[in-house]
Image (tube, helix red, strand yellow):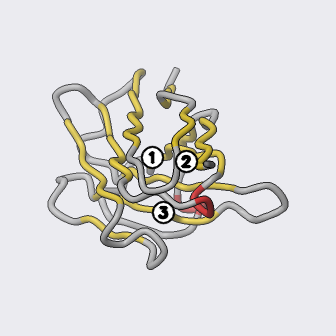
C-alpha cells in the first residue's frame, strides 16, 4: 500500500523559515514526479512546487518562486520543501503528491495519483 507522510505541522512568524518533508512508502518514486500543493480555507487546492522523477527539473508557482525550494532524495524515497521568508498568505494545509508512473512535472492536482493527508502550516505574528 502506497503512503505519503508529511512532517509537521508548523507555526512560524512572518519572515521565518520552515522545512517540510514527505516520506513515501509502498514503492519507490525515483521514476515519478512529486509535488507540493496547498489549500487555504475556502480556497481551491493550488500548485506550489514539483520535481521531476530524475530530480533534474523543478518548477514553482509564481507566488513562491525565489522563496521555496523543492528537493528529493531517492535513496530515502523522500521529497522536501524548504520554505523561506514565509508570509501570512502562505498559511494553508500543505499536501505532498506523487504521480503514478510518470517522471514529468504537471501542475494540476488531477495529474497526481497519490496524496498525503496534509499538514498545517501557519504563518502568524
Viewer-nearest of labels 2 and 3?
3
Q: Earlier in the sequence, mark 2 or mark 1?
A: 1
In the foreground, 50 or 121:
121
Mark positioned earlier in the residue sequence (2 or 3): 3
Disc marking residue 70: none
Q: Residue at x 37, y 59 (%)?
A: 50
**Coordinates of residue 106 in the picture (x, y in percent):** 44, 68
Tags 2 and 1 touching, CB below 8 Å: yes
**Which residue in the protein does label 3 denote?**
48
Q: How many marks?
A: 3
Decide: few, some or many residues near mark 1? Use Cα within 10 Å; few <14, some 14-19, many ≥20: many
Q: Secondary structure at mark 2?
A: loop
Name the residue beneath numbered marker 2.
113
Mark 1 and mark 3 in contact? Answer it, CB < 8 Å: no
Numbered label attached to residue 98: 1
Q: Residue at x 43, y 68 (%)?
A: 64
Q: Residues under labels 1 and 3: Cα distance? A: 13 Å
Seen in the picture, residue 60 relative to 15 is either above or below; the reply is: below
Above or below: residue 21 compared with residue 49: above
* In the displayed structure image, the side of residue 29 where residue 10 appears, left or right: right
* Horizontal and vertical percent position of residue 55: 19, 54
* Disc 2 from disc 1: Cα separation: 6 Å
Q: Residues within 10 Å of mark 2 (few under 14, many from 20)?
A: few
- Indicate left or right for 62 with 79 as reference: right
Direction from residue 7 to residue 85 in the image, left or right: left
Say which element carries label 1.
strand
Task: Say whether disc 1 or disc 3 marks the residue closer to the N-terminus.
Answer: 3
Amino acid at each position: 500500500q502506497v503512503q505519503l507522510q508529511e512532517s509537521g505541522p508548523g507555526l512560524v512568524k512572518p519572515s521565518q523559515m520552515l522545512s517540510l518533508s514527505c516520506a513515501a512508502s509502498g514503492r519507490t518514486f525515483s521514476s515519478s514526479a512529486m509535488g507540493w500543493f496547498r489549500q487555504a480555507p475556502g480556497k481551491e487546492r493550488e500548485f506550489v512546487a514539483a520535481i521531476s522523477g530524475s530530480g533534474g527539473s523543478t518548477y514553482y508557482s509564481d507566488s513562491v518562486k525565489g522563496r521555496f525550494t523543492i528537493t528529493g532524495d531517492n535513496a530515502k524515497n523522500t521529497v522536501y520543501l524548504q520554505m523561506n521568508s514565509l508570509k501570512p498568505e502562505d498559511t494553508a494545509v500543505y499536501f505532498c503528491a506523487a504521480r503514478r508512473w510518470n517522471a514529468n512535472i504537471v501542475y494540476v492536482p488531477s495529474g497526481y495519483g497519490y496524496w498525503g493527508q496534509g499538514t498545517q502550516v501557519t504563518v502568524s505574528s
